[in-house]
Image (cartoon, helix red, strand yellow):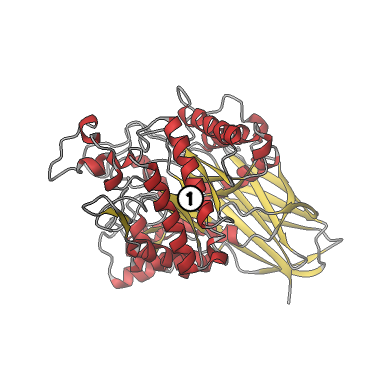
Amino acid sequence: MPDPTHISDATVHVDCGTSLGPLRRLWTSVGFDEINWASTPTGKRHLKTIRDLAGEPYYVRSHYIFNSGIGWSLPHWGAGNVYHEDAAGRPFYDFAIADQVYDAVVRTGHRPLVELAFTPRALVPEGAERRFAFEPSPTQWSPYEAGLWAMPPRDYGKWGDLVRALVEHCVQRYGAASVGRWLWELWNEPDIYYWRGTPEQFHGLYDVTAAAVKAALPEASVGGPATTGDLGPGRRGHEFLRGFLAHCARHGTPIDFVSFHTKGARYTPWRVYGPLGGEAPVRQSPSSLKMLREVRDALGAVAAHPQFRALPCIVDECDASVPAHWGVYDNANFAYRNTEYFAVFQCKLMKKLLDLNARSGAHVHQATTWSFYFEGERFFEGTRSLFTAGAIEKPVLNAYRMLSRLGDSRLTATSTHAWPLDRLDGEDAAMPEEIDVLAAAQGREAVQILVWRHADDQYASDGRESTVAVHLGRLPFGGEVQIEHTRIDARHSNSHRAWQDLGRPSDPTAAELTAIKERQGLEAAEPVRRERVHDRALTVRLSLPLPGVSLLEIRPAS
């Protein structure tokens, strides 16, 4: 008998003759805290891997370009070390690290989203240490690393000069045409501990920053405020965003895009102290519904100002859980980051964000995965990353491979067991199991169908696969077609499973590393097959495990 708690079968309909317009490629954006790791040999190789799989540039965002420090990152920390003052208090700049970082991004075919943050040590307000209770020791940060960097700069004029100098330097180094496609953003999450000032102080700093960017390059795009989603008590992120937009509207401050964040989970407790490899004290999973609700509310705040409705909205941290640098040894609930679950979650989330755009007065243009890599971690540490130790690509990277293969035009597609956005205001805390679809076409040359089975529960399992019938109508071609079927699940496109099957080696041999990497790319679910189209229609049948995602690529047989 079918299990009533799971979906036994579903029907998908794709109308290849009805386009919903250009497919907005929300996913072409990546970010990370540790700015200096962009320019390591490993970081540059990983940036090139992303460019090669995508076939198009990603926007790349990172923290700490203006932070003072040694120019080497630690988890959740880094330093561009740009700003300095001489003994007389006269500013001077050192762009050596900035050049290394932006060279790495640009030369691998990407575009920087420059987060103009945070306060350099020489611009920390006088007396700030007395207001910031912290006792430094050799095993802890100094007061600056611990939080003085989040203080408002003591001199907004010097801050504006710093911003202008950086933009002008980048124009000189990379050219106005290139830098004109970059994005310039003030700060990060000023509604929480990243900003130890008032909203009004932030508004003033944004005015100075926007003026400085435009003075250096009038066609440059500047925006913010990169607030948290925060639907909890007080809704600090939402209220900060609303106040910022009201300020820009009232004063006419230039703003070319609006940025904000969303996170699907903050586990309680975040970190567990006990024997390594222990079970999670409470089983928890990311909630795509929490994320969609936060984005929906932020889009509503933007749309409340008619003059801002057409601005690109950038969710430049769009992540299933926080923090990025903790993993399975901190809390076993971070295990999903190693597995196929995360890959399917990302495919589902991107489609739901596209659907949200269709019913909103403002629109998401980018949904940044705040995931890159970490120096010094163990194999499959469980950090929020695209790569693990040994330069192994994690299963989630294959989600971006699949998304990159979708054509430029979105097609009308429905599923009998999709979770509808009409239920976004319902009582569900997490999205239940669904089978849904995202379909696209590349002219008359090919049709792509992405179909998945997923629930917002990383511990959910079903020994039976769901049967899915994919009906395609009004295909742009007839005759014989070839169907390429790739899959991400527990047994396909899964380096983590390959590592597990080898006994989870902590120091894989060269042969073991090769065996793991052989499984890290997209793998076929079945051999390429040929079918004949009748009356411009075709039905493809497949089965989906939980979780799992399939990509069907259909084109005329050569």
Count neighbours of disc 1 (C-alpha within 10 A) and say few if under 14, some if 14 to 19, many if 20 or more: many
Report whether 76 appears left or right of 170.
left
Q: State the residue at coordinates (46%, 61%).
A: 168
Q: Position of residue 414 (x, y in %)?
A: 72, 45
Who is closer to the viewer here, 546 or 168? Answer: 168
Residue named by callout 1? 212
Is residue 163 placed above or below 46 in the rendered structure?
A: above
Q: Position of residue 56 (x, y in %)?
A: 57, 65
Q: Name the residue type under label 1.
A: Ala
Q: Residue furthest front?
A: 88
* Residue 5 makes an appearance in the image: no
Q: Position of residue 294 (x, y in %)?
A: 54, 34
Q: Quadrant of the C terminus?
A: bottom right
Report whether 185 appears left or right of 510.
right
Q: Position of residue 34 (x, y in %)?
A: 35, 53
Q: Residue furthest right?
A: 535
Q: State the residue at coordinates (62%, 32%).
A: 300
* Count of numbered circles in the view: 1
Is residue 470 placed above or below 193 in the rendered structure?
A: below
Q: State the residue at coordinates (37%, 66%).
A: 100
Q: Residue furthest left?
A: 138
* Residue 482 makes an appearance in the image: yes
Residue 165 sits in quarter = bottom left
Who is closer to the viewer here, 174 or 191? Answer: 174
Residue 80 sits in quarter = bottom left
SS class, disc 1: helix
Q: Quadrant of the N terminus?
A: top right
Who is closer to the viewer here, 173 or 406? Answer: 173
Q: Residue furthest bottom?
A: 558
Who is closer to the viewer here, 502 or 312? Answer: 312
